[in-house]
Amino acid sequence: MKHTLLFAAAALALSACSPSSEPADETGTAAAPAATSAPSADHGFGPEISAEDFAAHVKVLSSDAFGGRAPGTPGEQMTADYLVAQFERLGLKPGNGDSWFQDVAMVETTADESTSSAKITLGGEERPLAFGTQMALGTRSAQPEVTVDASEMVFVGYGVNAPEAGWNDYEGLDVKGKTVVMLVNDPGFHVDSTDLFSGKKMTYYGRWTYKYEEAARQGAAAALIIHDDAGAGYGWDVVKNSWSGAQYDLPVSSDPEPRLPMQGWITGEVAEQLFADAGLDLAEQRTAANQPGFTAVDLGEATFSATLNSSIKEGSSRNILAKLPGTERPDEAIVYTAHWDHLGDHSATHGGDGNAVSAGSEGEDHIYNGAIDNATGVAGVLEIAEAFTVQDPQPARSVVFLLVTLEESGLLGSKYYAANPVIPLKDTVAVVNLDAMSVVGPTKDFVVIGLGNSELDEVLRPIAEAQGRTLVEEDSVEKGFFFRSDHFSFAKFGVPALYAKGGIDHVEKGKEYGREIQANYQTVAYHKAADEFDPNWDLRGVVQDLQALYGVGRELAGNDAWPNYVEGNAFKAARDESRAGE
């Protein structure tokens, strides 16, 4: 396959368009609350991919006015208004028939920590667990009150049932009505053994979402994951911030995956004390859990009790999508995706109407602006969309620009789209995902998360080489990034998915400089209020990234290739099956 990268230089007259929004549907499902007016970028956009245009989008989307872009709040409406205005400015078509939106039904659950409680009882002694500092707890049941009463506790290692690997932590175990306690990540990680699963590289069995699903399939009453920074890939603050405030989910009717009545995390300190009180050593049990044939261990006579009181509100959020119809094969599509949502405003507990019901601490920044995560990805999609609108010739296949909701709640918007695609997934050539773009600056390396999974690597490789860059695997394979962003919702159905971004080997300042920038973001800003727009970012690397990712789509949209996953990859069978009738 010949790979070329051409960038159009034709002039484009751009004019501002007024925002467009849609009312609630006739079933009575509420749309996002109306906002007074969305800030606009006071900026003259040009047709080329540029740092100035990219920064203008990020600055608006991550402004305090958008309130952290939480689904179901005025910030959602402002985001929708801004994005639709940009799509209209570019002359794109609505992506869902005559609509810019795909409604995603959601259930908003907000725990009332003042009336909720949790405790572990052992040897007649009760140990209350404090929300936020010792544990995080939630429910996906959509019930206003969920109770677990004196549920026996059992340690199930990593909570993995992988028949193809000959591994089952639930072998011979009946956990119905019990509370399972498990380790984060998957076997092999903590002992760095490549003989177990993928060693340091996380598989899907290491993701917390999988662990809860498997515990539900086993009939558990509750599941608690023991947090550790290395295994999770982030600190306890990320857990606390991500699990506080309103939590969003798809309705049970829209999601066939099994659900637990109650699920959550406990800190390593709480776990160590629990195991010690049960006459066990956590470190020894962690080692045992990494051995084939591990047998689950009862935690003495320990029981878990909790009452979780929550306010439940049914509502609707929206995926926002536009389309550039193909000139020859419009029923085949390349999809660019990024999530527009973030964690909202934590200065108070907000209802879906944006009204505060309890105040937060004064003098602190409680708006989770989500500048890097993921205003950068959204801005990147807008820049790529603009490049497509002025390219000559126009693409033979359609290009869909899909900005999804509820990623921070477990990839829910992309999950919904993958189950209800506007272009069938068998006719979706590839997905290119943009999430938390690198602002390190120009780098010699180009990170492909999940490098080696699909043939898309070979579409990107010559484009990157023409930029003087080398494709590399992600630096922290143990963090499971391939399973943590929206492309994964497509991969599960076999659609080849590319998730790539700038690396750490700065062209002028080297690897240590790049590592320092990335480590600072992970420690200081990731899922925190400090994730804000910085006018001092070095965006030269972002421009290169966007040009390369645009080049991948341009190549695929202009030919008749159908890339696939490589032999031996878990997703190849699904792709083969979907394309079998073609």
Image (spheres, rainbow, N blue to C red):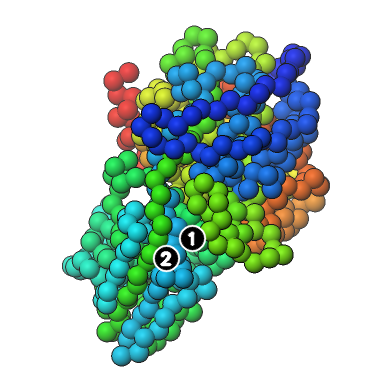
Task: List the residue tagged with mark 2.
Answer: 137
Q: Residue at x 48, y 29 (%)?
A: 23
Residue 122 falls in image quadrant: bottom left
How far is disc 2 from disc 1 in space, using C-alphas? 7 Å
Task: List the residue tagged with mark 1.
Answer: 243
Residue 221 appears at what percent x and percent y? Answer: 27, 66
Q: Between residues 426 and 353, which one lies in front from this camera angle?
A: 353
- Seen in the picture, residue 324 relative to 244 is either above or below; the reply is above
Q: Residue furthest bottom?
A: 124
Q: Amino acid at mark 2?
A: Leu
Q: Quadrant of the C terminus?
A: top left
Circle 1 sits in a helix, a strand or a loop, which is it?
Answer: helix
Q: Residue at x 52, y 9 (%)?
A: 327
Count of marks placed on residues: 2
- Seen in the picture, residue 145 relative to 488 is either above or below; the reply is below
**Can residue 385 be seen from the camera position used here?**
no
Residue 444 falls in image quadrant: top right
